Each structure stands twice: as C-alpha cells, then as structure tokens.
Image (cartoon, rainbow, N blue to C red):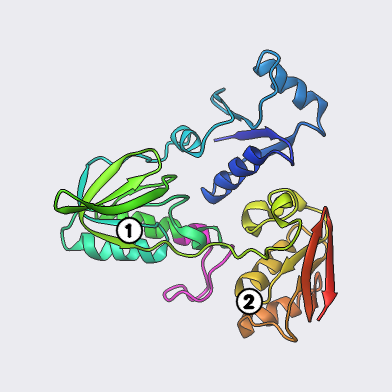
Amino acid sequence: MTIKLYGTNWCSDCKRSKKFLGEQRVRYDYIDIEEDEQAQAYVRELQKGGMSIPTIVFDDQGVLIEPSNAELAEKLGLDIKAQCTFYDLIVVGGGPTALTAAIYIARDGYDVLVIERSSLGGQAGITERLDNYPGFPHGVTGGEFAERVIEQAKRFDVEMISAQNVVRVGNDLDAHFVETEDGTRYRCNAILLATGSSYKRLDVPGESEYIGAGIHFCATCDGPFYKGQDVVVVGSGNSAVEEAVFLTRFSPQVTILARGERLSASKLAIDKALSTPEIKVRYNTEIVEFKGRIIASRRL
C-alpha cells in the first residue's frame, strides 16, 4: 500500500498520524506542504479549497482528512473491535510479554483477547535489531520478531485488537471488565496488565514544543526524515547506543550525549558504536533546553 501524508512540521495531528503509522510499521511518504507549493495546491484541490491537515492519500484513491487513530486503523485493515463480549482472559498490552502470556494461556484452551493501544509487538517491534533474544543466534529485526510472535499467537486463536486505548478496568456482574476509549466494554474471568514501558521524557524547556518536529523517540520510525543531516542521541544505554548505530544509515554524523563518564550499554553495543566512524560520544553532558534545531547543554 502506498500512502502519502500531507502536513506541516508544526501540526500536532500530523505528528500523531506519523507516529501511529510508524508504530504500525507502515511505510509512507511525508510531504511538507509549506515547502512544496504543488502539494499545497493538491491538498486544496482535494478539499475543494480547504486546507485541513493531515491529509492522507492512499493508493486506492481513498483520502482521510484529520483522521483519528481509530479511523486510520480501520483504513489499514487493523482489527479494532473484538468478536465477542466475554473472554476467559483479557490481556491489556500487546508487547512480547503480553503476547507470550496470551500464547501460554490459549494453548490450554482458554479464550484470550489482547488489547493494544498502539501496534502489536510493542517497542520491540519498532526496534532496528534484537541481538539478545534467545533462539536468534544472528539477531533478528524488531519487525520480523513481532510478526513471528503475532503469527504464533494467531496459531493458537488468540484474538488481538490494536489502536484501542484501555481507559478503565473493574468488576461488573460477577466478572471483571475492560473498557476502551470508544466506550466498548469487554467482560472476562481474569485480566492481565502487561502495559510495558513508555518513552522517558527529559522535562526540560522546549521539549514538548518540538516533539515530532526535531525531537523523536523512535529512530526506526523517524530516522529517514533526517537523511543527510547531523543528529544527536540522548542517553547511554542499549536503546540509545543501538539506535545511534542505526541512524548512521541516514546521518553523516551522530553524536551520543551521555550524562556519565562512560556508556552504560552492553559491551557488544558499545564496541559497535565506538568502532563506527560516524559516531562520536560526548560524556558528562546534560540537556537543559531545546531551542529549535539547537540543543543547549552544559558540562557536568
């Protein structure tokens, strides 16, 4: 499927749609209508003079204007509604832990529903490469790993829905229930919360303003937008160091900013990063503010 997303770098809904497509591992072309007059004219033509963004065009000539994540999910053919209203187990979360638990329970003949707010496979699914997971001696891409786990879950009839945010859990009519953001309520005998982790924020001035427009949390999703540009990775653990290596595919210079005197990633990851000519490391550095494309920092 060919997808073109027309938007601007300052549009919060554009950032949300880009993030959602990236998390779903869906390839798309992004066109900044402020930089492309022909694209701007095309958007006006589609909307008969309107200029609402994001405007998302699909290869079947379908168009979505300012879609919600649920509308995008429906267009992409993702399952966003469960088939039943009652299950033996409902798992909240769709990462590796959640899917593994679902597989174990379903193998014993229980009906299992997995509800994921973003994409099945979790953060592992958008990781460039996994080298520390048993059974893959040569490593595996995050996308391939996620697809394998999802396929295994399907084999045991685990029902999975994505792009659905759980807003409430509780007890109802002698059973438990899980309620999603659209008001749908599913009941069950047991609930397993496997909500995973969220991206760590620095909580410094300018951070919220530039998220999606210079500040990102997923190199796999957004790295290609910065082809030919120097980039900075903040952090010293495995995720930071591994994504820094990945970013060298697009960027001529990747600088890792580490708070401490050394990197805290695994030896394998560190050795790979330090032997990559495009990567340099700046130690004892703390971020104090983001200003457009300039990062203000201080030596610790």
How far apart in space, not on screen, are marks 2 and 1 (Cα)?
30 Å
- Checking the image for residue 293, the label placed there is none
Location of mark 2 (residue): 237
Location of mark 1 (residue): 152
* Position of the N terminus by quadrant: top right
Q: Amino acid at mark 2?
A: Gly
**Residue 113 visible in the current orientation:** no
Q: Which residues lie in the magenta part? A: 128-145
Q: Residue 2 in the image: x percent, y percent?
A: 59, 34
Q: Residue at x 81, y 30 (%)?
A: 36
* Position of the C terminus by quadrant: bottom right
Query: In the displayed structure, does residue 162 sit left or right of residue 234?
Result: left
Report helix, strand or loop for mark 1: helix
**Residue 105 visible in the current orientation:** yes
Of pointers 2 and 1, the one earlier in the residue sequence: 1
Residue 288 versus residue 117 in the image, above or below: below
The picture quadrant where one finds residue 97 is bottom left
Q: Residue 149 in the image: x percent, y percent?
A: 38, 60
The picture quadrant where one finds residue 20 is top right
